[in-house]
Image (cartoon, rainbow, N blue to C red):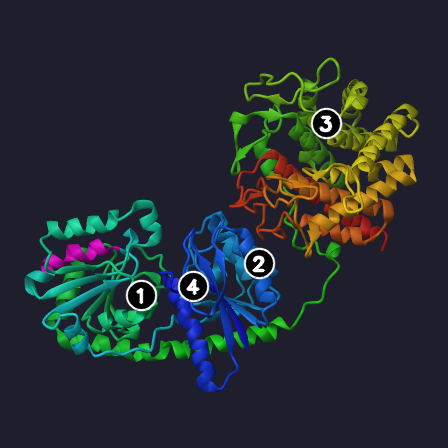
Amino acid sequence: MKIAFIGTYPPRECGIGTFTNNLFTSVIINDTKKGYSNDGFVVAMNDFTNKYEYPEEVKLTIRQEHQEDYIQAAQFINHSGAEVCILEHEFGIFGGQNGVYILPLLHRLEIPLIVTLHTILKTPSYNEKAVLHEICKMANKIVVMSHKAIDFLVNIYDVPEEKIAFIAHGVPDLHFSAEKSKKEFKLEHKKVLTTFGFIGRNKGIETVIKALPKVVEKHPDVVYMILGKTHPNVLRHSGEEYRIYLMRLVKTLQLDKNVYFLNEYLDVKDLFKYLSATDIYITPYLNEAQITSGTLSYAIGVGAAVVSTPYWHAAELLADGRGRFFNFGDSDELSSVLTELLDNPAELKKLKTKAAEYGKKITWPKIGEKYIAVAQQAIMQGTEKPEKKDTILDLLILPPFSLDHINRLTDDTGIIQHAKFGIPNLKEGYCLDDNARALLMVLMAYRQMKDARSLELSPVYLSYIHYMQNKDGTFRNFLSFSRNYLDEIGSEDSFGRTIWALGYLLGNAPNDAYYQTGRLLFFNAAPNFEKLNSIRSIANSMIGICYYLKTNPADDSMTERLRNMAHKLINQFEENQSDDWQWFESLLAYDNGILPLALLHSVEILNEEKVLEVALKSMQFLTEHTLKENYLSIIGNEKWYKKDGERSVFAQQPIDAMAMVLMYHQAFHVTKDKEYLNKLYTSFLWFLGENDLRLSLYDFETKGCCDGFESYGVNRNQGAESSLAYLISHLTVLQAYEEFHEIN
């Protein structure tokens, strides 16, 4: 069995790195002892610009904030011959917002995945929960080191319990004489208290220092050893502020002879010598939110008497008399516990004996055997490939259609264009684009569902459009929250989107009053149709014209306008196309699917072979560049994709996903090819997490949609454009589902 390990790794000074190294070694040790044919290699995480001289088992490194490294690592692992991958997960060691960069790597893995979770938060942020939930979804097996962690995963992160395996934190199988260790460190006549690990404020070391005066008063030979460097993240942001505070506290309490700081990252051998010389080991963490503690496991493993606050891992590991507790931040109680134990050597010895007995069960060779067993299970499960289903039939994973967030964004003027997270941002006011989209969405919702609230909202958005139309038929775009115009003439894009919505209204009006208002606005704007220069504005307007002509086919003048606009797109296509570039421009930019979509709508009216040919060619080209590996990867608006250039991944936006959904729906409508329904549904799943970052943009709490994702992760703002794009896409999926069953 060949195993790929992903995590930090020595000589990087990191607790996860030490864990990864011990786990790797324990698997190889079991190989030699048990006759297994195990082999393995490590993919090591590098932090920022640091470079390390890694041992030979490290075959590849990933720079934390370079997403391309993660993709390359997935390819390397897939072609390495590895049969299973073990990931050490901890927040802070992977790049992007809350470590989101690890998700594309895991998604691309073609072998079973085991994840060891070193931190599981009880109250995660939205992004923390989303990232961890996605990791657990992709994992074949999830290893945790406390039973509390199992409870959290099942009840907070909705992880199936059968996926979870409990394996204790391993400890090195090292043993040193207490007497010799004390002598080596010149501590022969001292009662030694110890805390080790990276130093930071959450460690609560000041609690111990404040407890010492009362202890020293009775036991002047006590020395408190604080072993470890300041945590790299703390050092980066706060320097040695905390260590200096502790040293000043020591001076203030006149404990200079009783407290010793060793500002080093100790190797395992020296660390275990210090632990062997320890009379009482202390973990004084300030709150319960510590699901795993490697330092505590080491102390138990060496057979130390442990005194600790009752954080989650300690509460389990020190149960059954393996340690003593004191309350968080309670120096007086700690003084009493320490004094009592130092006064009673027999009780101290009893704690050490129980700890040592348990420590024998969690040595790394034994833990390695358990990981090997889990790996073998994962490989067996991984060979069972689920049968691929026709995606269009699977509507069970769609959230219920909801207008909650749209109601939140809408007032009696129109829909607010931006939001701070899920709250309307009134400072940004309103825009024509979003009110046109909102009108389109509620008309679709009323047509398909007869949703009463949709009908109530329709006149709000329609009246906004009416308010923003100029005498010459053009439209203003932006309106402040105080209802002041912010421009004279809006963009051509906003004009085109408005014509789309008005055309849809004329083809699907819920009553005559709305129809007559829409007709007035539509034909006031009509003289401007052939003045448009932006191809996306032309495309959006064409879609609106097509909806109008479907119910007014005798309007020859409007049909001719549509024909002229369609040929503008075709001419643009022919000017820019080449053998390897079948597109309307020399770049793929934003809202790309709208261009083939407009031609696909026009085919139904014009019935021209050339229109269909260009529509299908351009759609196929767009598909080849965005719909691969069974998910939608939108062209990023950060730099777009210039011909002969590099494709931009960020920032991906929901309107592009909506355009793809609508494009494939219309392609199915024209061709009756069911494969377009699968592509439609795959494109829709972009909203729900089937994307490059493997994160859902739909917020199941607010019922809104996030504004897209950047290189750092999801943009959590939930503006009107994004939420409307999601809802229009959702309604299109439902409509496609009905159409599919009508022909089957």
Residue at image mark 1: 295
Q: Residue 149's mark?
A: 4
Binning the other alpha carbons within 10 Å of mark 1 as few (below 14), some (14 to 19) or many (20 upward) gives some
**152 part of magenta stretch:** no
Neighbourhood count class around disc 4 (C-alpha, 10 Å): few under 14, some 14–19, many 20 upward: many
Q: Which residue is mark 2?
A: 72
Mark positioned earlier in the residue sequence (4 or 1): 4
Residue 719 in view of the camera? yes
Q: Of circles 4 and 1, which is in front?
A: 1
Query: Residue 389: percent from the left, percent from the top?
Result: 73, 62
Amino acid bearing label 4: Ala
- Quadrant location of the C terminus? bottom right
Residue 157 lies, with reference to residue 470, above or below; the image says: below
Closer to the eye: label 4 or 3: 3
Which circle's residue, 4 or 3, is located before the other in the chain?
4
Question: Residue 286 location, x and y as percent?
Answer: 28, 54
Q: Give the spatial CA distance, label 4 vs label 1.
A: 18 Å
Instruction: Tell me the kind of residue under disc 1.
Output: Thr
Task: Tell me the number on the disc at residue 498.
Answer: 3
Q: Secondary structure at mark 4?
A: helix
Mark 2 packing: few (<14 Cα in 10 Å), some, or many (20+)?
some
- Region of the chain picked out in magenta, as a range: 204-214
**Mark 2 or mark 1, whichever is nearer to me:** 2
Q: CA distance from mark 4 to mark 3?
A: 52 Å
